[in-house]
Image: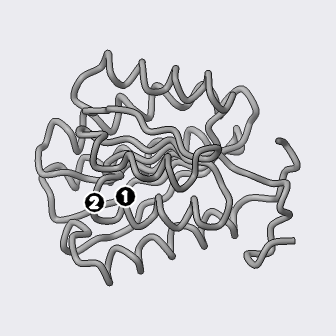
Amino acid sequence: MTESGWPSSYKRVWFITGASDGIGRALTEAVLARGERAVVTARRPERVRELIERYPAQALVVELDVTRREQVQRSVSEASDRFGRIDVLVNTTGQLFDANVFGLVDVTRAVLPFMERVCRGHVINVLSIAPGRLAVEGFSAALAKQMAPLGIKVSTFESSANGHHPEESASVAEAIMAAVDDNEEPDIRG
């Protein structure tokens, strides 16, 4: 067993958008530090490349601008090729409505088939003061109702300052990890 209480053989695959800073970065580092795997996405992947050096077997760094559908499809395909599945999707927020709403929906739509196939998973949308907050809240609520019968959980987390304060980012990342741990049973898949 690991310190987190999970068997060391259990390694979820997290797909984290906006991993170059804020909540996305804090969450990515925490997930990798405890031995889980992560698809680390950023518009500028050079800002997260050092994670491959620290976690070569666990981290897959992918360029992703969530407003570009071809990049969304390519990044999810790369995740599937590398890890074979996606267990947790975390959509962090940016500064633009297109990214916060349309990008979030596009990424979620690309990832959901992996979760639906195995009837398990967790979609997490981080809410902030950014444009589109109400749209993301509505989408998340509707998605939660639709996915519940399939064993897929949908959660939202608050971020008052877009996660750009290190203490807040770490606190939200910790809350996200705790929620995922509380809502999923360990699985011994490799």
Label 1, on which residue?
24
150 or 92: nearer the viewer: 92
In the drawing, what numbered circle is on residue 39? none
User: In the picture provided, is 22 more to the left or to the right than 85?
Assistant: left
Give the SS element for disc 1.
Answer: helix
Residue 99 in percent (x, y) is at: 20, 39
Residue at 24% x, 46% y: name it: 135
Foreground pick, 77 / 141? 77
Q: Residues within 10 Å of mark 1 (few under 14, many from 20)?
A: many
Question: Residue at 28% across / 60% down in the picture?
Answer: 21
Going by the image, does 111 lie left or right of 180?
A: left
Q: Nearer the viewer, residue 13 or 35?
A: 35
Residue at (62%, 62%) from the top-left corner?
A: 180
User: Measured from the top left, where is residue 175 in percent x and y?
Assistant: 50, 75
Left-right relation of 97 to 87 = left
Q: Amino acid at mark 1?
A: Gly
Provide the secondary structure element on which disc 2 rests.
loop
Extreme residue toward the bottom, this view: 167
Task: Name the outermost residue toward the front.
Answer: 53
User: Residue 133's spot in the image, x, y percent?
Assistant: 22, 55
Residue bearing mark 2:
21
Residue shown at the point (56%, 38%) measured from the top left: 146
Q: Is residue 3 above or below residue 45?
A: below
Which corner quadrant of the image does residue 137 belong to?
Answer: bottom left
Task: Give residue 59's position: percent from left, percent from top.
Answer: 54, 45
Where the N terminus falls, by quadrant?
Answer: bottom right
Q: Are marks 2 and 1 in contact (CB under 8 Å)?
A: yes
Q: Is residue 71 above or below residue 183?
A: above
Q: Quadrant of residue 97?
A: top left
Above or below, 17 against 109 in this view is: below
- Which quarter shows the C terminus? top right
Q: CA distance from mark 2 to mark 1?
A: 6 Å
